[in-house]
């Protein structure tokens, strides 16, 4: 670079895609964030299904195949719970990183509109979280279809519906975290607020009977209402009411969105179910 | 169309925070192709003015233009050829220097991405470009900040206190960089409270105090405008003082560390020279051996203190 280029009227050719790529770069290079999110999505699926596969391999009389529709539902519920937390982490980072580092100001003085800078965070962040979820879904689908054994394997339609539902829930929590992060300019505060909402406030709201059907609009419950029937545990009942499920009177007893492991039944060879993690619902594993 | 001779123009620019006026009626004209200093004490409103120019904060009243384009109306267009560092340059510390530049290049446009290598080379960071910024020294971050500005191939660079925290070698390097940028036809506006550095670096400047531009012009004009002073060392300073005390052109005499500082009243250059010669003749005629007789060049620092102390007295 030497002499100043003579340009009387600079062309304002500023495509949007490089901004999205830059957002992906910022998130992708945040190794701690990516490792945590990967552990909560891909890692969790690897661990959960590996345990099921090993249990079935060593004791097939007592532990059914790792695949099948029931284990699809359980795996997806676990992924939805942990994946939404990962989405919150990534959304908060995408929303607040530029502000906390002071780089946002440096980007604004390029003349680029604040709206464009903000909007690019949405596809950028989604690209990161969705790629992790996609990898986790590949594990879920591979195991539940490939290792169904004597159980019915999930249909293509059910898998498609499940994936769409999962992505909508993940995208929702990502978007909320992104917006809040951008508003507060603090990643830590954003994560604290949304985890508190997810883990503590939601179960409390859903257990307040006086709220009636208003509880169905609380995100955790609303997403359960939208989930495909086949992947939701049997104890939900015939009506899609959140009350029995969230109040602790149902067999689940604990909100699946806040305690995602609580409903994992692994199918027995005779299609009976067994909860591998029921500490909060019945106190010990049921056999 | 002939470009405006000024890359920055403001008229009646004012910024208030509540009842406090931080920038008041600023009329500024920064000549194209120069290094321009915006000089003032801490809290004088320098950064606020820069923030207004860059669209980081709104002006309460007044108008401004960058590169002949009114801002904020055509801010995007104007800033496309402006590079700015406001206070300390900020980066994502976990990214490398190159990655940080890639992020800004993405906001600037495709041409900027092609300038990354050249910019890194220019500021001497080629060997460290792939290291994380968290491992950089302040001087290296300042240089990376300059590299980031160069991505825009800027006609105008606005630097807010760019020499803060730099060691003497870093300051000299920075000064050289600024001069080389100006030699390429760019304009550099830098704000600072480091008078000595500004004087060595810029061609013209504005002195700002309490939000107002007190004076602006070339360094030569500003330093010449003050009353002339003559430094005299002789074998008998007390007699010399007595001899010169009655001279019509002399307004005051101060004795400092064996030197008489003889200040003349406000006179033009020709009269000033005649007065110097006459003072010398009188001392010689009085039989006082003179060791030293030297016109004192008013430093920017002296002018700055004169101006700001006058303002304080007026207040």
Image (spheres, coloured by chain):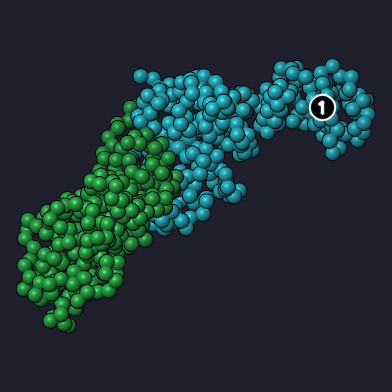
The colour chain A appears in is green
Location of residue B126 in the rendering, given as x and y in whole percent from the top left corner: 41, 54
Instruction: Indicate the quadrant where residue B250 lies.
Output: top right
Location of residue A126 in the rendering, given as x and y in whole percent from the top left corner: 25, 50
A57 vs B78, left or right, is left
What is the residue that sits farthest to the front in this orientation?
A: A210
Closer-to-camera residue (B184/A182): A182
Residue in view at x 41 percent, y 36 percent:
A109
Residue B307, compared with residue A235, is above or below; it is above
Q: Can you tell which chain is drawn cyan?
A: B
Residue in view at x 22 percent, y 56 percent:
A244
Instruction: Indicate the quadrant where residue B230 lies.
Output: top right
Location of residue B27 in the rendering, given as x and y in whole percent from the top left corner: 53, 21
- Mark 1 — on which chain does it sit? B
Q: How many marks?
A: 1
Residue in view at x 51 percent, y 30 percent:
B49
Q: Which residue is mark 1?
A: B262
Instruction: Indicate the quadrant where residue A155 lies.
Output: bottom left
Residue in view at x 82 percent, y 21 percent:
B251
B45 vs B254, left or right, is left
B269 vs B30, left or right, is right
State the quadrant of the N terminus of chain A.
top left
Residue A97, compared with residue B231, is above or below; it is below
State the quadrant of the C terminus of chain A.
bottom left
């Amino acid at each position: 670079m030497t002499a100043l280029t003579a340009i009387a009227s600079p062309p304002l050719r500023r495509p949007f895609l490089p901004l999205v790529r830059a957002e992906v770069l910022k998130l992708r290079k945040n190794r701690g964030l990516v490792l945590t999110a990967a552990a909560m999505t891909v890692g969790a699926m690897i661990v959960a299904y590996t345990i099921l596969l090993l249990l079935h391999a060593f004791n097939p009389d007592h532990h059914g195949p790792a695949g099948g529709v029931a284990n699809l539902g359980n795996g997806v519920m676990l992924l939805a719970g942990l994946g939404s937390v990962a989405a919150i982490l990534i959304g908060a980072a995408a929303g607040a990183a530029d502000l906390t580092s002071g780089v946002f100001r440096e980007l604004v003085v390029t003349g680029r509109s604040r709206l464009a800078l903000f909007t690019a965070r949405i596809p950028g962040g989604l690209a990161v979280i969705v790629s992790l979820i996609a990898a986790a879904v590949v594990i879920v689908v591979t195991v539940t279809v490939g290792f169904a054994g004597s159980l019915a394997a999930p249909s293509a339609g059910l898998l498609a519906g499940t994936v769409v539902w999962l992505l909508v829930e993940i995208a929702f929590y990502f978007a909320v975290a992104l917006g809040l992060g951008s508003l507060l300019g603090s990643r830590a505060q954003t994560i604290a607020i949304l985890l508190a909402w997810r883990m503590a406030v939601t179960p409390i709201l859903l257990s307040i009977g006086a709220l009636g059907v208003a509880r169905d609009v609380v995100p955790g419950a609303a997403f359960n209402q939208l989930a495909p029937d086949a992947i939701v545990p049997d104890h939900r009942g015939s009506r899609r009411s959140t009350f029995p499920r969230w109040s602790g009177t149902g067999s689940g007893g604990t909100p699946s969105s806040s305690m995602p492991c609580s409903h994992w039944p692994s199918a027995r060879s005779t299609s009976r179910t067994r909860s591998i993690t029921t500490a909060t619902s019945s106190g010990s594993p049921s056999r | 169309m002939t470009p405006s001779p000024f890359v920055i123009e403001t008229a009646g620019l004012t910024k208030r925070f509540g009842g406090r006026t931080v920038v008041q009626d600023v009329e500024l004209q920064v000549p194209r192709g120069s290094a321009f200093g915006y000089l003032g004490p801490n809290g004088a409103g320098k950064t606020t003015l820069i923030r207004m120019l860059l669209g980081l904060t709104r002006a309460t009243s007044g108008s401004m233009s960058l590169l002949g384009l009114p801002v904020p109306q055509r801010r995007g267009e104007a800033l496309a050829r402006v590079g700015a560092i406001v206070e300390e340059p900020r980066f994502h510390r976990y990214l490398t220097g190159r990655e940080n530049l890639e992020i800004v290049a993405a906001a600037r446009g495709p041409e900027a991405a092609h300038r990354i290598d050249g910019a890194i080379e220019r500021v001497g960071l080629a060997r460290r470009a792939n290291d994380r910024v968290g491992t950089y020294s302040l001087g290296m971050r300042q240089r990376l900040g300059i590299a980031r500005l160069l991505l825009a191939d800027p006609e105008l660079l606005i630097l807010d206190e760019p020499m803060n925290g730099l060691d003497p070698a870093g300051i000299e390097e920075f000064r050289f960089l600024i001069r080389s940028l100006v030699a390429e036809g760019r304009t550099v506006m830098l704000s600072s409270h480091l008078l000595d550095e500004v004087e060595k670096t810029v061609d013209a400047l504005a002195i700002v105090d309490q939000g107002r531009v007190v004076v602006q012009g070339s360094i030569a004009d500003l330093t010449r405008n003050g009353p002339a002073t003559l430094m005299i060392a002789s074998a008998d300073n007390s007699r010399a003082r007595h001899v010169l005390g009655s001279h019509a052109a002399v307004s005051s005499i101060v004795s400092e560390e064996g030197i008489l500082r003889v200040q003349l009243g406000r006179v033009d250059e020709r009269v000033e020279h005649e007065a110097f010669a006459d003072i010398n003749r009188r001392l010689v005629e009085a039989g006082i051996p003179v060791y030293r007789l030297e016109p004192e060049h008013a430093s920017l620092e002296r002018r700055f203190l004169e101006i700001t102390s006058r303002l304080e007295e007026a207040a």
